[in-house]
Image (tube, rainbow, N blue to C red):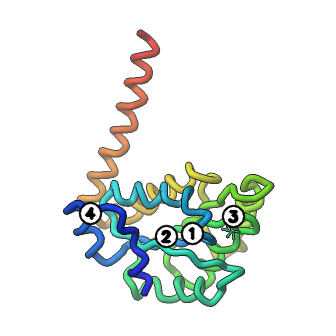
Amino acid sequence: SWKNVHFRTDIGAKAKKRLSAAPAVGIIMGSDSDLPVMSAAADLLKRFDIPYELTVASAHRTPERAGEFAETARKRGIRVIIAGAGHAAHLAGAMAAHTTVPIIGVPIDSSALSGFDALLSTVQMPPGVPVATMAVGKPGAKNAAVLAAQILALSDPGLEARMVSYKSAMADEVNAKARSLEG
Ligand code: RP5
């Protein structure tokens, strides 16, 4: 099952709790070569204590597996899908074709065109089939996790509090840099 593809790289009590909970976010990517970028999304979801599942399926190389992931997502309790792919990146769009679960797309900079191809393939969806498209590469993977968390936080006050402290930690960091520059 998709649940078997949880990332089990940490063993703390918090991680155990997260891994035993039903995943709320599904992370899917076109190839394992996308993992160095997409793990940035997984790391942030961990930080926000959001249970997720993570797997590889390709819109072009394993279209049935990709379709099944999206078709069964809602039943599995998935509330947001994050899909990352490079080259002619149709994975996020293929997800959107199969489900009403909101799709966040991450264009990966894995081709000779450095992700410009993936950006256009991900963002230019026809009317009626949206993919919320993030920035190219790792910043986009991070933003995908933040956006997914913000969507889930609409109905989760505890998570909303974590999102507020995430924002204020970012502000503190910038303020500290400003202070050190100003001497
Ligand atoms: C895309 O092709 C994948 O999303 C990946 O970014 C790229 C290269 O895949 P590999 O040839 O490394 O498997 O479908």
Quadrant of the frame with the N terminus: bottom left
Q: Residues within 10 Å of mark 2 (few under 14, many from 20)?
A: many
Q: Which residue is mark 1?
A: 83
Label 3: which secondary element:
strand
Residue type indicated by callout 2: Ile
Task: Give the residue type that dot 4 points to.
Answer: Ile
Which residue is disc 3 drawn over? 86
> Tag 2 or tag 1, which sits nearer the N-term?
2
Give how far across and how far down residue 4 sits, in percent.
39, 81
**Comparing labels 1 and 3, the label whose residue is closer to the camera:** 3
Figure quadrant, ligand 1: bottom right
**CA separation in Å, label 1 and label 3:** 10 Å
Residue 2 lies in what quarter of the image?
bottom left
Residue 11, numbered label: 4
Residue receiving disc 2:
27
User: What element does badge 4 sit on?
Assistant: loop
